[in-house]
Image (cartoon, rainbow, N blue to C red):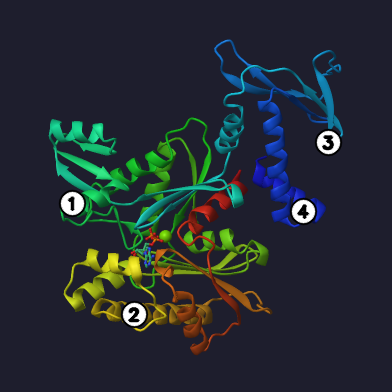
Amino acid sequence: MNREQLRRKVALQTSVESTKVARAIEAMLEIMGAALVRGESVSMRGLGMLEPRTARSGLRSVRLRPARVRHPAKSGTESTTTLFGGVMDQRAHQDERGGGDQGDQRSQDTAPLGLDIGTSRIVLSRGTGHGAKTETQLNAFVSVPYSKFTENILKQNKVGYYLNGGREIFIFGNESEKFASFFNVDARRPMKAGVLNPSEENGLLVIQTIIEKLLPKTKKHEMVCFSVPGPGRDMTSDLVYHEAMLKNLLQGLGYRAKAINEGLAVIFSELESENFTGIGISAGGGMCNVCLAYMSVPVFQFSTNRAGDYIDQSVASVVGDATTRVRVAKEESLDLRRTPQTKIEQALSIYYEEMILSLVEALRTDFVRAANLPRMDRPIPIVLSGGTASPKGFVEKFASALEQADLPFKVSDVRIASDPLTATARGCAIAAMHEE
Ligand SMILES: Nc1ncnc2c1ncn2[C@@H]1O[C@H](COP(=O)(O)OP(=O)(O)O)[C@@H](O)[C@H]1O
Ligand SMILES: [Mg+2]
């Protein structure tokens, strides 16, 4: 059982609000961790005793003595304190380095893993809730011709690279953006429209290199849940192939892997207090993913290809500018609430409007078409996430499009995810926790 599972069980058994339970567990672990760092052992009746140990090499560890072993109370310089109905055993300790980190490392090692493999970015979440740690890499690469000199320079500057058969050097992930703008080229993308890019033969290799940076090889067979798109409305992309190749890749790195729909992951991450009932939407670069779930069970899911990349390309073509420049303008300063100031802003607002209207229309028609809909007596929440949902005014625009549409269900509220760029990864980690 990990910390998150403990939190849920305690919340269920005590009917204490789960955020309060999380805080209490956090505090308890902190207090116990601090005691162990001070060299005290921590004893809990019925469970056993945690004892700090220092090996001759100086390496520190913590040992659990199960409850059946008896520990007579110590005397002299050592004192005892009662804790949780048990006994805390204090001892003098010389070396106080690293104990706290150790506790942290331990919980990180067992944290559930969620991986959002998006067209634009790959996000890893270790852990769930407040304790979740996320890390992001751009899902992109730049290739430069091989030379020993370039390789040495990259090494000296600690830039991650991959040698492709000795002819080219791939600079991948976050570093790729700097290189692309320096050489004035567009970074290449291993994925397109939400799935593996068929015209990029090195795509899977690059994804593997990026994932290995986030999730090193393991022998422990930890479970990792990774995001996959829902069936496409605009084109039939091969989801089966995409999902199978990524699963293979993760298994090759030593993990157990399970795919989870991206929209459902957003629901897992954001709608816990609504019993995982509602609509989750992830608007990314390659696509928008939508899922309606009732008590965590997906009712329907779909994806559209009109998302960030579509907006960038459409705007670039009508204003005659480079796609990258459009994207930078969009990410840096777009505010959909104000009157457009430039030609690019004008075009961005038009294509955003069109994307939102087509997404709402898709939602309406799929809802009407869906068979076996559960009875939705109450209005349901809609939660938006992803980079494309980030500009100011997006939520308001989306909510007003919903009001105009004649929807066959009632919406309680439209909200943006607590962190729109990591919601999918965090939801995948929650899914992984339930797979353990
Ligand atoms: N602040 C922002 N404003 C508008 N668009 C943004 C912002 N940040 C990222 N984006 C856009 O969001 C898209 C990427 O979203 P993300 O959720 O990271 O994608 P994916 O699921 O495709 O990996 C890109 O089109 C990017 O230009
Ligand atoms: Mg995404």
Residue count near mark 1 (Cα–Cα under 10 Å), binned few <14, some 14–19, many ≥20 = few
Question: In front: mark 4 or mark 1?
Answer: 1
At label 4, which amino acid type do we have?
Leu
Q: Quadrant of the C terminus?
A: top right
The answer to the question of whether label 4 and label 1 lie on touching residues, with beta carbons closer than 8 A, is no
User: Quick check: which quadrant has ligand 2?
Assistant: bottom left
Judged from the image, the secondary structure of the residue bearing numbered disc 1 is: helix
The answer to the question of whether label 4 and label 3 lie on touching residues, with beta carbons closer than 8 A, is no
Q: Which mark is residue 12?
A: 4
Q: Is residue 280 above or below residue 86?
A: below
Residue count near mark 4 (Cα–Cα under 10 Å), binned few <14, some 14–19, many ≥20 = few
Q: Is residue 56 above or below residue 242?
A: above
Q: Is residue 270 visible?
A: yes
Question: In front: mark 4 or mark 2?
Answer: 2
Question: In front: mark 1 or mark 2?
Answer: 1
CA distance for labels 2 and 3:
59 Å
Q: Quadrant of the N terminus?
A: top right
